[in-house]
Every structure is written in structure tokens, then in C-alpha cells.
Amino acid sequence: MERVYIVEDHPIYREGLAAYVNEEPGLNVCGTAQDVPDALAGIDSTRPHVAVVDLQLKTSSGFDLIQDIRYRWPDLRILVLSMYDEIRYADRVLRMGARGYVMKDKGPETVLKAIMAVLRGEIYASDRVKDQLLLGKLEGSPTDVLTDREIQVFQMLGEGNSVADIAEKLNRSPKTVQNHVDHIRRKLNIKTRQELYQKSKEWEMGQVGPPPLD
């Protein structure tokens, strides 16, 4: 029996996906969690074969969880499940060590297909992502110039969060978050705070490509 651990902050989606996966012969959802601390404790006690991780969690970040899992259990396979555009994030999470990326709007059937592929040792991504990877054209985001934490802060700015909001959600000091913001502005050649919020909002909504770098 292959054990699956689901980390997702939306309870209805989490429990619905767990029920769907449990109907598949040979699969068992051994646990669920809504944030990083509970996920790490649950994974440690259940030792799943694959962890399905949402990038946006209740009080923490899926990016942080991926890094923690890779450090603590390097053999544990990770499948990222997210509402965020795969073209913007798939390349980054695959380079971090995840074995697949699925967007939530694809439905539980696709998630199950991805879980099975990852358990077979395959990398799972949509044809759209595979084509872009092969062509070396996974663009449309600043992921090549921003660190994982910076891309997370940039994303949260685009969602309308203030520096104080982000500091609270990431359990970091406002000064640390402001340092990340300053680094983002320098790297993306953004001059004003207003421009930063506008660019992050446009990028988060998928309306524009990456901010200009020159």
C-alpha cells in the first residue's frame, strides 16, 4: 500500500481529495495537514511515499515545506498542487526537488494521475510545461532573478498584503521582510513602492510578463 500525505489549507478541498485518493486501490492517505509544522510532524510519524503539497498554506509557505522535506527526507517524493499558474512556478519547484506540478483547476482525476506517475519515479507536468521546458522558454516570471523567499514576498505583495501582513504570515520581522522588498526592487529595477505593488499585482494576476530588468 502506497502512503500519501496531503498538505492543503482548504479543509473542503483537502478532505475531498483525500476521500478521492483513498478510493484508488493501492493508495492510502496516511495523514493531512494545513501548515508546515503539522505537516512535518505528520510526515515524521507516518513516513509516506509521496507528499502532495499546496504552495499556499494557512500560516506558512509550501516553498518552505518543500525545502524542509528535501533536507529531512530526501527520498520522499513531492507533488506540488497549486492554484498558481504552472508557467510561473513549475520550473522553480522542480528545481527545488519536487517531482511534479498540478494546478487545482485540473480536478482530482489529474491529481491522482500525477500521484501515480510520481510514485512510479516519473516527473509529472502538463504538456504545456514540458514543451516550455524543452524549448527553454519558461518565462513570464522573475523566478530566474529572485530567490525563493523573494518570489514568495513578491507574490504576497501582489495579493494585496502589506509588509506588516507578510511579516506576520511568514513569522518574520517587518525589517527582514522590508529587506526582501528592497532586494526585489533592486533586482527588478523598480523605482517606487507604488510601481512595486502595481507590478506584483499584474504579475500575480497573470496580466503581464516579468518586470523589465533594464
Image (spheres, rainbow, N blue to C red):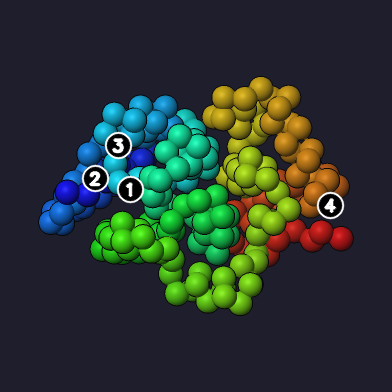
Give the image location of residue 138, x and y in percent.
61, 67
> For numbered disc 4, what is the local secondary structure?
loop
What secondary structure is found at the residue carrying circle 1?
strand
- Image quadrant holding the C terminus, namely bottom right
Per the model, the C-alpha gap separating discs 3 and 1 is 9 Å
Image height check: is 73 above or below 85?
Answer: above
Sequence-first tag of 2 and 1: 2
Q: Which mark is residue 3?
A: 2
* Dot 1 amino acid type: Val
Residue 139 appears left or right of 123: right
Q: Residues within 10 Å of mark 1 (few under 14, many from 20)?
A: many
Residue designated by label 4: 189
Do we see residue 39 in this rendering? yes
Query: Gap between marks 3 and 4, in whole Å?
Result: 44 Å
Q: Secondary structure at mark 3?
A: loop
Circle 2 SS class: strand
Which one is earlier in the sequence, the residue at label 2 or at label 4? 2
Where residue 195 appears, as percent x and y from the top left, is 78, 49
For residue 73, which quarter of the picture? Answer: top left
Sequence-wise, the earlier of marks 2 and 3 is: 2
Residue displayed at 45% across by 74% down = 127
Measure the C-alpha gap from mark 2 to mark 3: 8 Å
Mark number, residue 47: 3
Q: Earlier in the sequence, mark 3 or mark 4?
A: 3
Work out whether residue 17 or residue 118 is closer to the camera in this orientation and state it: 118
Q: Nearer the viewer, mark 3 or mark 4?
A: 3
Q: Give the class, few, some or many, for how many residues have Cα within 10 Å of label 3's Cα (few <14, many ≥20).
A: some
Q: Residue 34 appears in which quarter of the rendering?
A: top left
User: Please, what is the three-letter code of the amino acid marked with disc 4?
Assistant: Asn
Q: Are marks 2 and 4 in contact (CB under 8 Å)?
A: no
